[in-house]
Image: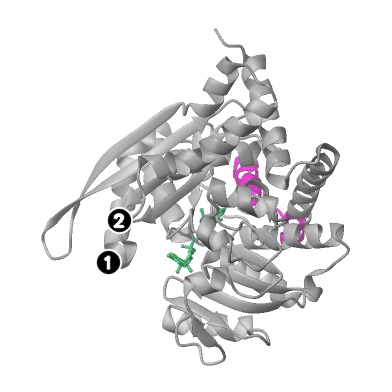
Amino acid sequence: MKANEIANYFVEKTADMMELSGNVKKLLLTPKRQLKVQIVLEREDGNLAIFTGYRVQHSDARGPFKGGLRYHFAVDMEEVEGLASLMTWKTALVDIPFGGAKGGINCDPKSLSQRELEILTRKFVEQIHEFIGPMKDIPAPDVNTNASVMAWIMDEYSKIYGFNPAVVTGKPVDLFGSQGREEATGRGVYFVTAFLLHSMGRSIKDCSYAIQGFGNVGSWAATFIHQHGGKIVAVSDVSGGLYNKNGIDIDSLKDYVRKKGEVKGFPEADYITNEELLTADCDVLIPAALNGVIDTHIAKEIKAKIIVEGANAPILPEADQYLEKNGVIVVPDIIANSGGVIVSYFEWTQNIQQFRWQYEKVIDELYQKMKSAYDSVYNLAKSKKVSLRTASYIIALGKVAKAIIQRGVY
Ligand code: NAD
């Protein structure tokens, strides 16, 4: 099942439950603009390679389009469309003045040199610059993109339009980025995990965790959970997984990954597969790699009673139904990984105001935003006796539908 079908499934289900009109439902499901561009790159060996780039702008009813940029071989229009839709619900749920978008280039970034990646990125900007901008659409990092990629985008865009740091977020801190942005998504995953455990009368340090993905989101979520006394028994990345029932020392693992580039071979744990990681014996499972990794077959084997979606759309709808029926609590992506876009909003605000926030202010404001969104989701779920995902969608769809109606449909 593709990411757009997953996203649309949850939207349709909630819209029907909310008895939204057919017309509003159609508007919520239909992306406003879909771009597909061809990027020609002269490789260092002299051969020409042609890549396909995408940008889907799902909704700007509540503010400029906002969403990450992914470099991966699985990127296609359907995936980008689904991820763009998720951004619309995420920005609405956490109440920041943006809509939803997503983009990407279908490529294997590991097979490209840094120089080739830079040229690819700049050529992508050449193709889409008319459609992005500080008040139009603001890209950010996602899978296999980082602060350097954002700096190239800012530089290329500024060549055409002049000084414009707010065109993109997730930039290096020394180049108009925000303090705390790099680790914001992982920190947010830690915050919501702590909020949920607190609601259940438990705490971070009472629990054991398995985390899939040791990139930006996974490694920072692991860092904060580890720092607060949580026992991380399993971790994985694309190279495979690690398991140690006594807990993995995340600082040593980070050092190891910095040197070796992957978790495989880390000496203080046993090797496991990614499927074994998802079904490992633990209290909390945090999928923080790719979408669609938990199907019904895997869901039936999952031992964790809590799943916090660090990644976007890691659970397929049927598996989600199975988990809900079987009492597994899922904290959905649109709140669990919203920390990144919240601090992106702070970065955009700082760029527009030409004013820098202190690190402590960023963390405090992030905490307040996430706590307030979590409380409204948790209270609604409790009062309506629905899952946290359904409650999140009810709030998000309600806000976007209201904005569409207030703007006027003609
Ligand atoms: P990243 O590129 O920094 O890291 C991805 C990690 O997943 C790497 O450790 C990689 O090895 C691992 N991985 C890739 N394929 C895998 C596979 N088949 N099995 C197991 N592990 C695999 O990406 P990221 O920014 O950490 O993003 C991870 C997820 O979080 C994505 O779903 C992304 O959309 C979502 N997300 C990211 C942000 C952000 O701020 N970066 C914000 C919100 C959501």
Dots 2, 1 in contact, CB < 8 A: yes
**Along the horizontal axis of the image, is 29 left or right of 113?**
right
As drawn, which residue projects farthest toward the right?
201
Q: Residue at x 64, y 66 (%)?
A: 285
Q: Secondary structure at mark 1?
A: helix
User: As rendered, which of 380 and 342 lies closer to the eye?
Assistant: 380
Q: Is residue 272 visible?
A: yes
Residue 123, numbered circle: none
Q: Is residue 17 magenta?
A: no
| Disc 2/disc 1 C-alpha distance (Å) | 8 Å
Would you say residue 352 sits in the magenta stretch?
yes
Query: Which of 400 and 317 lies nearest the eye of the viewer?
Result: 317
**Quarter of the picture holding the C terminus:** top right
Please identify the residue farthest to the bottom as the structure is shown: 267
Give the prevailing secondary structure in the magenta stretch: helix
Magenta span: 341-363
The residue wearing badge 1 is 111
Left or right of residue 104, residue 188 in this image: right
Label 2 crowd (10 A; few <14 / some 14-19 / many >=20): many
Name the side, left or right, on which 408 lies relative to 38: right
How many C-alpha atoms fall within 10 Å of the one at disc 1: few (<14), some, or many (≥20)? few
- The residue beneath circle 2 is 107
Percent x, y for residue 350?
64, 46
Q: Quadrant of residue 407?
A: top right
